[in-house]
Image (cartoon, grey):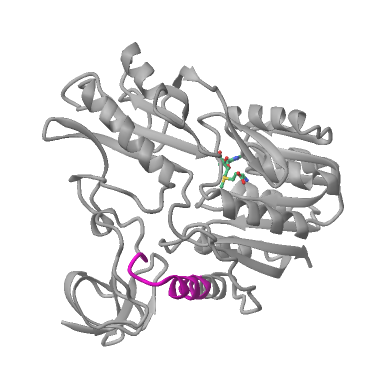
Amino acid sequence: MLLKIKRSGINGEGIGYKKGKPIFVMGAFPEELIEYEMMEENEKYGIGQLEKVIEPSPRRRHPICKNHEQCGGCSLIAYDYKGQVRMKEMLLKEALKKYAHYSGKILPMIKNPNVLGYRNALKLPLSMVDGKIEAGMFARNSNEFVKLERCIVHSKLLEKVRQEVINALQQNEIQAYNKSKINGFKMLVMKEFKEKVQVIFITSPMEIPQKLIDEIMSIEGVVSLYQNIKTDDEKDHDLFGTKMIHLSGLEKMEVEINGLKLLLLPRSFFQLNTAQASNLYEVVKSWTPHSDWIVEAYAGIGAMSLLVSEKAKEVIGIESIQDAVNNAQENAKINGIKNAHFICGDAGVELNKLDQQDRVDTLIVDPPRSGLDPTMRQAIKDSNIKTILYVSCNPSTLGKDLFALSEYAIEKVQPIDMFSQTPHVETVVFLKRK
Ligand SMILES: C[S@@+](CC[C@H](N)C(=O)[O-])C[C@H]1O[C@@H](n2cnc3c(N)ncnc32)[C@H](O)[C@@H]1O
């Protein structure tokens, strides 16, 4: 069947219309004429599989990744960068209009200086392929494991070290976890800052041979090695299990950003694109007004709290992961910042408690993709907070939250391209109480 693609959907899929009904086709881009096979159809929409591009978009280019179809992570890889930026500006505009009824100005996207090799972290499942352990992924919409040859958005050093780590695992005849056996390696997690790499193996309860530890630590660039034990009864959606074992090298990774030195434990969150995190933090710092009390909710290791500390009498960061809170407290100390304090807890619950004294005048929020939960929304609505800086990685939940926070007017919107080759958009919104 033929379809003319009219626009892009939130996941970067092409959308065309058949008798007024939207048909979503992954891998098709605006203005293309394509041939597709209908995979699923109901009264409201259809999902098609791209068969052939008959009239390609002038922005279509050769996809420079072997695994892109199975992986699905970089759904815009076959679209040029200028097209990606325009598409993401459009997706943000549509989400803010649809959910928040906002049709005001959106500042031009801050572009990514490195559109490839920008990711400072990876997490890949491990599996046996032809009798050898490999790192890879599960193909889109399937349980089939596919070996990842090379990922072009991971930093070059991460990819080089990954290959050497896999070679060491293979030479030591390490087995990937298999539900019918008891022991094995489940996932490979790696992070890189300033050309220094941390390796974390997520395994079933088992001991890692010292010979393998020594071999991993002798790989050029590796400075830190951990084992995380995840048992079968621990939740799938949590990456790590309860037991984290430091095997060798540095306990904490060090990130240098915008004049700060930050320490990071394996469980703590840090932005995936260090160069664009720096630009994001710069926007947040320059937009933050001078305040008495600033609260940063979802604070991670405290980067934004520490950066805005010179604009407040006191800054309080709230974060639910204890290791990240420990990092944030230590980060305040090593950067000589005395007016920033951190609390471990749920953002909404803790903001509510802090606001009892009505002293919070500025709030920075940087929630996960799911956005603000009802407790957080209510805590904000019940407060007297004058200014909010909302940092979002999901335009849809951002739009819904902005609609719910009707006491606030949107004054500035700044998109930042953190995740090139993917449809994800990072945005900072400046809100003022009406
Ligand atoms: C998108 S990250 C932002 C981190 C930080 N702002 C930064 O720039 O690195 C979201 C953070 O919120 C934390 N988090 C998730 N749910 C939370 C909750 N209900 N209360 C407090 N923190 C939460 C996560 O552990 C994570 O560190």
**Residue 398: horizontal and vertical position, in percent?**
57, 61
- Please, what is the dominant secondary structure of the magenta stretch? helix
Tell me if residue 77 is in the magenta stretch. Answer: yes
Is 397 drawn above or below residue 183 in the view shown?
Answer: below
Quadrant in the picture for residue 112: bottom right
Is 187 drawn above or below residue 53 in the view shown?
Answer: above
The image quadrant where one finds ligand 1 is top right
Residue at figure coordinates x 81%, y 32% from the top left:
336
Tell me if residue 408 is in the magenta stretch. Answer: no
Give the total of numbered labels. Answer: 0
* Farthest-out residue, bottom: 19
Instruction: Tell me if I can see residue 143 in this picture.
Output: yes
**Residue 96: horizontal and vertical position, in percent?**
56, 71
Is 406 drawn above or below residue 127 in the view shown?
Answer: below
Q: Name the residue nearer the viewer: 69 or 413.
A: 69
Residue at figure coordinates x 70%, y 55% from the top left:
282
Q: Name the residue nearer the viewer: 84 or 205.
A: 84
**Residue 76: horizontal and vertical position, in percent?**
37, 66
Instruction: Tell me if I can see residue 358 in this picture.
Output: no
Quadrant in the picture for residue 1: bottom left
Residue at figure coordinates x 57%, y 32% from the top left:
321
Q: Would you say 283 lies left or right of 275 here?
A: right
Residue at figure coordinates x 84%, y 49% from the top left:
311
**Residue 304: horizontal and vertical position, in percent?**
70, 46
Q: Would you say 365 lies left or right of 313 here?
A: left
What segment is highlighted magenta in the picture? 76-91
Q: Quadrant of the C terminus?
A: bottom right
